[in-house]
Image (cartoon, rainbow, N blue to C red):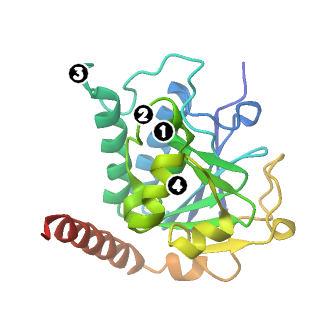
């Protein structure tokens, strides 16, 4: 029996950690992995013993995007496979992450590309390695992003550049642009060739996330951001 595509553990009280485990594929999102992620997220969100959820990747990368070497089906939610079905169903689930009551923290290193960048964008908080590579290269030959996080997080000019070129930004640039919360030096952010519970969080931060009121704050901030984005789009 093969190794699980998603590893689960609780590195400390109140913390549920999801580790994508397809290192040879740079944790590319195939049907099995996508289904496992959302099953685990829903379970953690409904677990009264869990206060915060962490998502990371094993091996040299966080996530290289959708696995184009295998068939991709609407595994997270059923969707009519008509024009636009792919974008509708994946964006629906990224928004589902925002609707969850528990804060979701992304831990990004190495490549964070295409669908992987959308997964990172759907996290409430994002901590990155300084040399991480974050972007959406498929705009060069395939399609625009399914969830266009660039316009939300990077500002108009940077977003336009990212969407027209497909170039990646580093972890440091991601923090400067507003996509990530904090970048860590490579030496303090080890490549996760082996899953180690010794590096589970930025120091001294989780106690605040696990406070009972954190889920309420998290939901209010999400709602405020969505309303602000809607108002900006409606302005003449």
Q: CA distance from mark 4 to mark 1?
A: 18 Å
Mark carried by residue 143: 2
Q: Quadrant of the C terminus?
A: bottom left
Compared to residue 31, the image places residue 108 above or below, namely: below
The reply to whether discs 2 and 4 touch (Cβ–Cβ < 8 Å) is no
The reply to whether discs 4 and 1 touch (Cβ–Cβ < 8 Å) is no
Q: Earlier in the sequence, mark 3 or mark 1?
A: 3
For the question of whether residue 184 can be seen, the reply is: yes
Q: Residue at x 62, y 34 (%)?
A: 28
Relative to 218, 44 lies left or right: right
Residue 168: image location, x then y, percent: 62, 52
Residue 64: image location, x then y, percent: 63, 40
Q: CA distance from mark 3 to mark 1?
A: 25 Å
Residue that badge 1 annotates: 139
The reply to whether discs 3 and 1 touch (Cβ–Cβ < 8 Å) is no
Q: CA distance from mark 3 to mark 2?
A: 20 Å
Q: Quadrant of residue 39?
A: top left
Residue that badge 4 annotates: 120
Q: CA distance from mark 1 to mark 2?
A: 5 Å
Residue 183: image location, x then y, percent: 68, 72
Q: Residue at x 83, y 46 (%)?
A: 193
Query: Depth-wise, is mark 4 or mark 1 nearer the camera?
Result: 1
Element at badge 4?
helix
Q: Earlier in the sequence, mark 3 or mark 2?
A: 3
Q: Of 148 and 194, which appears nearest the observer?
A: 148
Query: Depth-wise, is mark 3 or mark 1 nearer the camera?
Result: 1
Q: CA distance from mark 2 to mark 4?
A: 19 Å
Q: Residue at x 80, y 71 (%)?
A: 185
Element at badge 2?
loop
Compared to residue 128, the image places residue 118 above or below, namely: above
Query: Depth-wise, is mark 3 or mark 2 nearer the camera?
Result: 2
Element at badge 1?
helix
């Amino acid at each position: 029996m093969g190794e699980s595509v998603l590893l689960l553990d609780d590195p400390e009280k109140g913390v549920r950690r999801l580790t994508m485990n397809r290192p040879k594929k740079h944790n590319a999102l195939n049907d099995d992995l996508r289904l496992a992620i959302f099953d685990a997220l829903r379970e953690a969100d409904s677990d009264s013993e869990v206060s915060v959820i962490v998502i990371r990747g094993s091996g040299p990368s966080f996530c290289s995007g959708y696995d184009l070497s295998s068939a991709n089906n609407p595994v997270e939610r059923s969707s009519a496979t008509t024009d636009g079905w792919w974008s509708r169903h994946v964006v629906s689930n990224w928004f589902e992450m925002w609707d969850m009551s528990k804060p979701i923290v992304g831990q990004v290193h190495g490549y964070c590309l295409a669908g992987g960048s959308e997964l990172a964008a759907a996290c409430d908080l994002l901590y990155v390695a300084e040399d991480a590579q974050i972007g959406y290269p498929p705009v060069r030959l395939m399609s625009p992003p399914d969830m266009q996080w660039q316009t939300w997080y990077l500002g108009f000019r940077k977003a336009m550049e990212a969407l027209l070129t497909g170039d990646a930004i580093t972890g440091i640039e991601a923090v400067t642009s507003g996509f990530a919360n904090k970048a860590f030096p490579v030496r303090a952010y080890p490549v996760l060739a082996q899953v180690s519970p010794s590096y589970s969080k930025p120091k001294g931060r989780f106690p605040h996330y696990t406070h009972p009121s954190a889920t309420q704050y998290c939901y209010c901030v999400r709602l405020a951001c969505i309303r602000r984005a809607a108002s900006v789009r409606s302005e003449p």
